[in-house]
Amino acid sequence: MKLPLIIGCLILAGCKSTPYAMIDGSQSKVSDADNYNVEIVAIDGAFQSGKLTKNIKPGYHTVHLSTTGPLRSRKATSTLVYPLVAKECMRYVVTAQHGPSNKDAWEIRVLDERLIPTCTPSPVEPEQVVVIPNYAKPSSEVSCLTANELTQQTTPVVLLNSVAACIKSQDYDSAISGYFLAGAYAYFDTLRVPNKPSHEVVELIKKDSIWTLSALEQQHFEQKLAEYLGSEQKQTACSWVISVGEPDYAPLYMQQHQPNDAVITETTTELPAEIKDTLFKATLTDYLGCPLP
């Protein structure tokens, strides 16, 4: 008799879900002929295969949206960046607002921000000062690394700091390469390090690298990334990550991140070649959304 238990969870406050937020590109304004739905192309560098809605974790996200409206010119920009600081239990209704006389000119328009009734926010806690541990920092200063300088031994700690340096020097091609590889390698590491609290170290690395950039620097990079995605170079990025190959380092930065209340599981990241190959393929398909070669 599972049905009463399910009904009980819907009624009783004791059955709580993890707070989340939602991007909703499916509710364009019917009364406005120039307002269209948007497809979610990518979130934080992970491709989404053109979904209209997506649940996301609260916090900062770089969302790439593509208009479903008509574009007359091939040179028109089909993808724009939507920087979002998502709050718990909020639905963000976003659309594409095209110009009445020039359909190729459009901008992201937020129609509504409203609470998700079925979502329970976390209890309010006092804000704590974030301390970046040494294992989440590079051992020395990292300069901007080009795509040719990135290898299987380059960890997300170095990659994300390199991305920040590349953005500062306006070497956006190198920044984009490092950004894709950092996301792929960090995701791969979460697959081989089973302690979920350890995965939070990636956010600490971002706070100590790309999130230290000014709002203008971040915006410039996000726009360059949007242009890259809009130019249909996804396959190029996928092919390049495949050519670099799976990580060939021990994910010590993640293994050392053990919050006080975490349940520690003894594990090894020395995996057989066939398992590493399987995890890398999962990274390509599930995280980057790449077709397998």
Image (tube, rainbow, N blue to C red):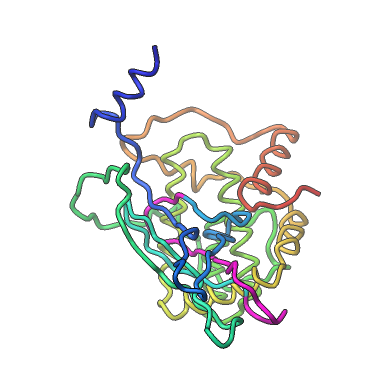
Per the rendered image, the range of residues in magenta is 55-77
Q: Position of residue 106 (x, y in %)?
A: 54, 79
> Is 128 situated above or below 71?
above
Q: Is residue 171 visible?
A: yes
Q: Position of residue 165 (x, y in %)?
A: 53, 74
Q: Position of residue 281 (x, y in %)?
A: 71, 43
> Is 278 situated above or below 161?
above
**In the image as oriented, which residue stretches furthest toward the right?**
293
56 magenta-colored: yes
Q: Residue 174 falls in which quadrant of the image? A: bottom right
Identify which residue is drawn at 65% across, 66% down: 177
**In the image as oriented, which residue stretches furthest toward the top?**
1
Q: Residue 101 falls in which quadrant of the image? A: bottom right
Identify which residue is drawn at 62% across, 78% down: 77
Identify which residue is drawn at 32% across, 24% down: 7
Identify which residue is drawn at 52% across, 60% down: 44
